[in-house]
Image (spheres, helix red, strand yellow):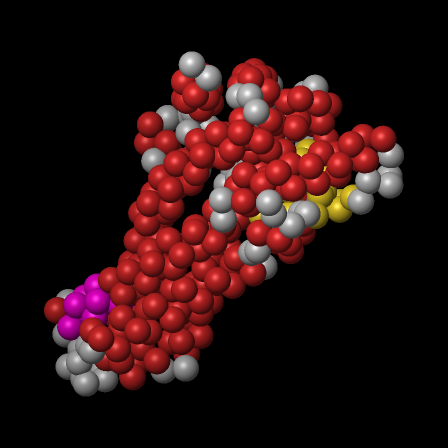
Amino acid sequence: MKRIVLFLLTNIAVLLVLSVVASLLGVDQFLTEQGLSLGSLLVFSAIIGFGGSIISLLISKWMAKMSTGARVIDGSEGTNEYWLVSTVKKLADKAQIGMPEVAIFEGAPNAFATGAFKNSALVAVSTGLLQSMDRDEVEAVLGHEVSHIANGDMVTLTLIQGVVNTFVIFLSRVIGYVVDKMIFRTERGVGPGFFVASLVSQIVLGILASIIVAWFSRRREFRADRGSADLMATPRPMINALARLGGVPRGDLPQAFEAHGIAESPSKLLGLFASHPPIAERIAALQATSR
């Protein structure tokens, strides 16, 4: 779950910075000086919206390493590290992608994969996961993460996030303009009401829009589970890994990097924002494929 939450929070931060910079440079003022030009506003929104998501994607590996303290290994560190790197290499070859960087981070059971490109990604597992699972189960989790890379989930997520960002920025400016003209009754250009209402609307709409991204993420988890089963020629190791995770306290990954680790939502409301479906649903879906 870690990867997506980090991506989302990074995206929101970059988006806000780009929006503030654009406002300071007078772009908002220019767009609204003679009335709101919806065409120009849409172009501006797309540039900022996709810019935020693309920047977040490009720095995702760096953010992952920094936020988790992940230590990249090459297999020469010891027997377990050699097995880990060799297993990722085997899975990557089967998935027909380039060898990802492999890393270990301290913490309770969890894992994630991230990166802007299929052939230069990062797969990381926690010490807790390595200690609590047997090798078949660890390999299944690695297969799940490799499948995320092979499926191009981060690139697809970036495109979806870019579209969502575009509409968030567009609608927040429209709301700000309406509030400024109808409530604050600014006659020429825009006043403080526009900037305040736009910023508040952008934050609120951004939170609501994350429901769309979270829904996409949940669908991708089922697909990555199936990918792991295909890479190992059986769903049983992934089912066992999920069952074990369901009974083991999962590590709290840094909230900013939660989206491609392993977790489930404690309530239906929070479930709308969850990047992962409940473990019971994931197990049931895998069991259905083995019938």
Q: Position of residue 18 (x, y in %)?
A: 44, 69
Q: Is residue 233 left or right of residue 17?
A: right
Q: Quadrant of the C terminus?
A: top left
88 and 193: which is toward the camera:
88
Q: Residue at x 59, y 20 (%)?
A: 237
Dominant secondary structure of the residues highlighted in magenta in the image:
helix
114 and 64: which is toward the camera:
114
Instruction: Please say whether residue 31 is one of the residues in the magenta stretch.
Output: no
Q: Is residue 275 left or right of residue 59?
A: left
Q: Which residues are magenta?
A: 173-181
In this view of the protein, can residue 74 be seen by the observer?
yes
Instruction: Please say whether residue 176 is one of the residues in the magenta stretch.
Output: yes
Q: Residue at x 27, y 65 (%)?
A: 170
Reply above or below: 48 against 79: below
Q: Position of residue 87 (x, y in %)?
A: 71, 34
Query: Which picture quadrant has residue 274?
Result: top left
Query: Which picture quadrant has residue 174?
Result: bottom left
